[in-house]
Amino acid sequence: MSDTVRPIDQSAARGETLLRVRDLKMHFPIKESVGLRRTKKVVQAVDGVTFDLKAGQSLGLVGESGCGKSTTGRMITRLLTPTSGEINFKGTDIARLKERDLRPFRRQLQIVFQDPYSSLNPRQTVSNIISTPLRVHNLVKKGNELGRVQELLERVGLNPEHHNRYPNEFSGGQRQRIGIARALAVEPEVIIADEPVSALDVSIQAQVMNLLEDLRRDLGIAFVFIAHDLGVVRHFCDEVAVMYLGKIVEQGPREQIYGAPQHPYTQALLSAAPDLGTIRGVPPKERIRLVGDVPSPIDPPSGCRFRTRCWKAEDICATLEPKLEGKPQSAPGHAAACHFAEPKVDLVAEIA
Amino acid sequence: MTTPAPEDRKDTMAESAAEQPAAPADAKRGPSVATRERRSGLMNPSGETPYLVVEDLTVKFPTADGVVSAVNGLSYSVPLGRTLSIVGESGSGKSVSSMAVMGLHDRKRTQITGSIRLGGDELVGMPESDLMKVRGDAMAMVFQDPQSSLHPLYTVGNQISEAYRVHHKVSKDVAKKRSLEMLDLVGIPNPIRRFKQYPHEFSGGMRQRAMIAMGLVNDPKLIIADEPTTALDVTVQAQILDLLNNLQKEFGSAIVLITHDLGVVAEMADDVLVMYAGRCVEYGTATDVLANPRMPYTWGLLESIPTVSAASEKLRPIKGLPPSLLNLPSGCSFNPRCPYKDRVKGERCTTELPELLPVDGAGAHTSRCHLHDKASIYEAEVLPRLG
Ligand SMILES: Nc1ncnc2c1ncn2[C@@H]1O[C@H](COP(=O)(O)OP(=O)(O)OP(=O)(O)O)[C@@H](O)[C@H]1O
Ligand SMILES: Nc1ncnc2c1ncn2[C@@H]1O[C@H](COP(=O)(O)OP(=O)(O)OP(=O)(O)O)[C@@H](O)[C@H]1O
Ligand code: SF4
Ligand code: SF4
Ligand SMILES: [Mg+2]
Ligand SMILES: [Mg+2]
């Protein structure tokens, strides 16, 4: 079944960098009226995000609500035009390309959304939904459309006979598969999956996760996987970037992020994640409890943005912004943005 | 975790487990006292005297398409100071059963049978005016979405004060003092300023705290929390769960916590009840159900979630979808999705509804499954896959 969708260009062997994102920013202008005065302000939704994505790799983006995960995903797929920064896809900076020039790249970079209910047009049949991108990109000869749609339905584990049905005749998990089939139709090299399983029930989540994993393995598609569930990210991603208030505060190989996190925020996130393991004898982990809420991205704290909730903060944290960089003792590729970064190894115990 | 050690369980359990579709005639008054006490399997898995006892609860909604059997013969109990978690897929009846306990269903459109006793008082069939006194006083509910339960046009302080004054004849000043105490108790900084603010001026986590403050203002002995942290970030979720834990320690309330997150269950629950298609399929202490599960659906749930602490193996999803409540499969409701049904002799899985029986012939840990060798299948096949 894996040959129903052609694997991408095999010369793009695993390891080649597909996507180079540099200092990406999205500042949304907003109007606020204070009394009679109207002031212009900006929401610093994403403020300087940098990462590489290699062919076949899966990068997890995690962090609390509003930290800029979706905005990052929408910039990479150019549903948004960044305020500044570079999105280099295989040698071309697409950050500011005009719509006409963007077209070939739109095909390569696909997005799958969180909400399987609102992301599909309820008035179109499944066949229509999936074949529209095929036509737009001239990917299939007239007359072969249905065959290709059925191939794709089969690839994502749906009954090919159901091509004439409407989205409301499918369950949430099935709709998410339709969204994935639509993304696959154009044979993308990168899929941005924005919380693809968050809206699904646990038993259905696993079905969709396994499908994404098969696609990654069989077709070599690279993923930027956005999620707030740390268990799901640990399962799917080999590289993890932790975001806080528009910035990446820690990034590295999965084993490092979960096994020896260095940034206080990553440590707090891991310590707060409820863990089923405890009941099967995994020793309870240390509890770190953050106080308060995430500050507003309109007026973020000076220096280190995490300092208003950080238990390790000192004076320097308010005046000097910490760089995202590897420390002398760090594993290769592991970087944290903290003046006092140090690994904590006892936060998530291993079961096996 | 408390170990289940009730002495006289053996004889009571088997009976209470018997599937007894409530006769329509019983609808108004519930089962008679005599049978109820004899069948009272509803001693808690801990053996302690329960505060809330739900027995043989059935909730049906007549609709244009037919009768929706949302809850079918559900029984459980919660003593003061203990937390019961109800888990299960979307649509399994978690919210409907809890709303029945709170008496929140539209009486005209809902058929409720069985018994719900709170501190000994029967709530099924209680006149609405009496029920209103119990609701908000002896029991309170915290919902997933605080937006929908806080009124947008009244200040947060006003709403908490009013919730207090409904049940206490006190002046506004006294009620305000009490509300400020509550805001402080749930960890809202600067209560005096926050008292005067509207819900939209609160963050999601703070609104959830305000909801809890309002729910707890009358010191309810029973708190039902329906997915109280699902909409919140993990760091805020941890704060709210700690808060519920601390309040329970301080006031000794009974808590029913509805959630689909088994991680939350592991950290919060004393007892766990697994629902599938409107029925309880497994019930016991948290250690019983999560560390020694004895029912294929529970196994499926455990095998399908990636945990923060587990190494990355392939997930094993439960195949298929939950059944329609308009038309439940015959026999065991889980049979269309169950990978073990071939191991049961004959066609029992598809013809005979399994009873909720003690997993080891006695004891308080019960499950609903025809398999004989549940323990050995779990140890030999399921456990190794859990990593
Ligand atoms: N069009 C917009 N105009 C103004 N502000 C915006 C806009 N879109 C997003 N924001 C703000 O930018 C910030 C980042 O939002 P984003 O949706 O990227 O967060 P997220 O990390 O995906 O959060 P979630 O986990 O809730 O999906 C938030 O503060 C959000 O309110
Ligand atoms: N008023 C009603 N009329 C008809 N059916 C209803 C009504 N209320 C609930 N139901 C049905 O009863 C079933 C159980 O719903 P319930 O809300 O208890 O599920 P749940 O377990 O809480 O699920 P979730 O995890 O999605 O909250 C669902 O199939 C639902 O559609
Ligand atoms: S730089 Fe300072 S405030 Fe920021 S995370 Fe490190 S210690 Fe905390
Ligand atoms: S009774 Fe049969 S179908 Fe139901 S869970 Fe047990 S083995 Fe599976
Ligand atoms: Mg988002
Ligand atoms: Mg519910």
Image: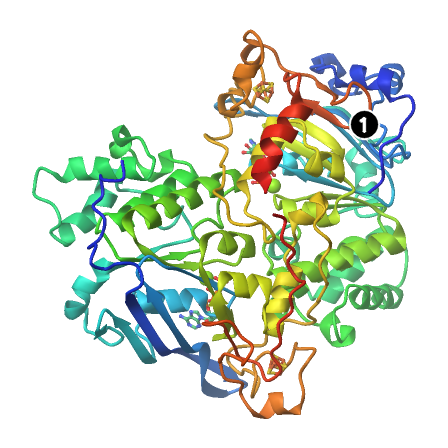
Please say if B231 is above or below A92. above
Give whichever of A70, A275 is nearer the camera.
Answer: A275
Tell me where residue B29 appears, x and y as whole percent. Answer: 80, 20
Identify the residue at image location x=30%, y=60%.
Answer: A55
Badge 1: residue crowd in 10 Å (few <14, some 14–19, many ≥20): many
Q: What element carries label 1?
A: loop
Give whichever of A202, B230 is nearer the camera.
Answer: A202
How has the structure been colored for display? rainbow
Identify the residue at image location x=30%, y=54%.
Answer: A221
- Residue A84 horizontal side relative to residue A316, left or right: left
Q: Would residue B288 be seen by someone viewing this image from the given angle?
A: yes
Please say if B203 is above or below B26. below
Screen quadrant of the C terminus of chain B: top right
Q: Name the residue under label 1.
A: B364
Q: Quadrant of residue B382?
A: top right
Q: Quadrant of residue A46?
A: bottom left
- Residue B302 horizontal side relative to residue B214, left or right: left
The disc numbered 1 marks a residue on which chain?
B
Tell me where residue B193 appears, x and y as whole percent. Answer: 74, 76
Look at label 1 and name its amino acid: Ala
